Image: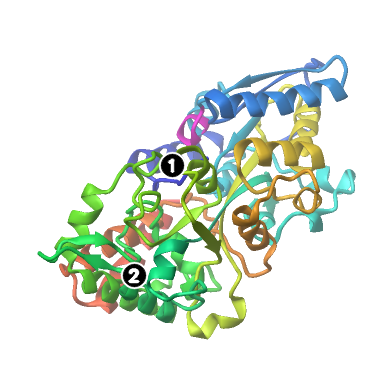
Amino acid sequence: MRSRSLLLPAAGLAVAVLAASCVGAVDTGKSSSGTNTITVWNGYSGRELDVFKSVVKDFEAANPGVSVTVVGQQNNDKLVQGLRGGSAPDVQWAASNDYVGLFCSSGGWIDLTDRIAKDGLDTGQFTPASWQATQYDGKRCALPALGDVYGLYYNKKLFAQAGLKTPPKTFQQLTEYARKLTKRSPDGKLEVAGYLPLTNFYANRVQFYAPFFGAEWFDADGKPATAASPGWKAYLGWQRDLVGSYGYEQAKAFTAAAGQPYSAANAFQQGKLAMMIDGEYRTAFIKQFTPDLDFGTAPMPVTEQKAADYGMGYVVNHIAGVTKASKNPDLAWKLVKYLATDEQAQVKLGNGLVNVPTWKPALASKDLVADPAFKSFVAMQVHPASQTNPTTAAGAGYIDPMSSFLEQWESGRSADPAAGLAKVDEQITGLLGQR
């Protein structure tokens, strides 16, 4: 459920193999076994798995005679392997929407369109970005179940010391703030970084920034279009300018010495990073490890051209679907629908996992624990301009070429943004061409 790493080559291979193994899969929509026992896989462990199990217990209590086996520690790659190898359960819960295109196009997860219509499900009650992320090529094979929403964290004490009163709303302001907030030792070493957008440092994932710059991955025909998108050029210019103001080697040394992201040593929690992008779950780590930290949360800045969209967020959607292997797809669908649309289930999951519900009635519930820091993410979740990744049949592997280029770009090893983006488009075309 935490900040996602980018798709690895091995995961891309799993995507290709699964697609080949599932071609022609058909959902009959019938229960072939009549059993009242189903199994659900998810990626949780420890306390988080207990939270999920408690919600499933509520489902069982509401449906006497039904038994649900919950299996944790099944990450996205294991979900793919289960579908490929024929060991998939009735229901799978994925911690991100990266694989939606794969699950839908391969038939690994069944199309839910008819079931949604038959049950009269009010899909307008899902938040816009979450609903966007659950279909591919006309197939709706998942329901959104929770979200990780990414916004800005800022240190109020450091803001006050720098004479700053409110969070920045544009990236130009963010750069100005970052320079005011940065502190160096007498020998020039970075002691406090105002904002450090080095690629893959903490939650600095390139896909998280794209919506705030209006950076497009694909054109209207689904063809890679990063080289033609003004948003990518704007992002590249802003990112290297800010990294360069620290000195690339100084910035790398700072990140190398920074504490682990999900520990008390996190640089933001230690007052060494004045601002950062992160998800709502960070509020739980702050409460656990550094409860006295005086911090605030806000939407991420946007470019001046996107000022009307300020308040939006980047959303990673947790999704649930019925697999083609299910012996009781009717009961499996009932569980998926419960997890995604039962108000109390959504509230309980949101509170227990410290994630943001995707079902609007749950977001409005008085039972949702939302302190001021968390409320920022609730507002971003329902914002009409909030976005997630584009969906492709190859998953989110198209992000990798851009991430690799950015690491070359920020270091100065690549000096030609147009050529770099053209190569990214070429690599993405090759990836999608394998489909």
Q: Is residue 42 above or below residue 166?
A: above
Q: Which residue is mark 2?
A: 181
Horizontal and vertical percent position of residue 40: 65, 25
**Amino acid type of the residue tagged 1 in the rendering:** Ala
Horizontal and vertical percent position of residue 386: 61, 65
Q: Residue furthest bottom?
A: 305
Task: Give the residue drawn at x 22%, y 48%.
Answer: 257
Horizontal and vertical percent position of residue 377: 61, 57
For residue 16, the mark is: 1
Residue 423 or residue 41, whichever sits in front: 41
Horizontal and vertical percent position of residue 159: 43, 68
**Quadrant position of residue 290:** top left
Q: Residues within 10 Å of mark 2 (few under 14, many from 20)?
A: many
Per the picture, the main secondary structure of the magenta-coloured stretch is: helix
Q: Which residues are magenta?
A: 74-79
Tag 1 secondary structure: helix
Residue 78: within the magenta? yes
For residue 32, the mark is: none
**Quadrant position of residue 123:** bottom right
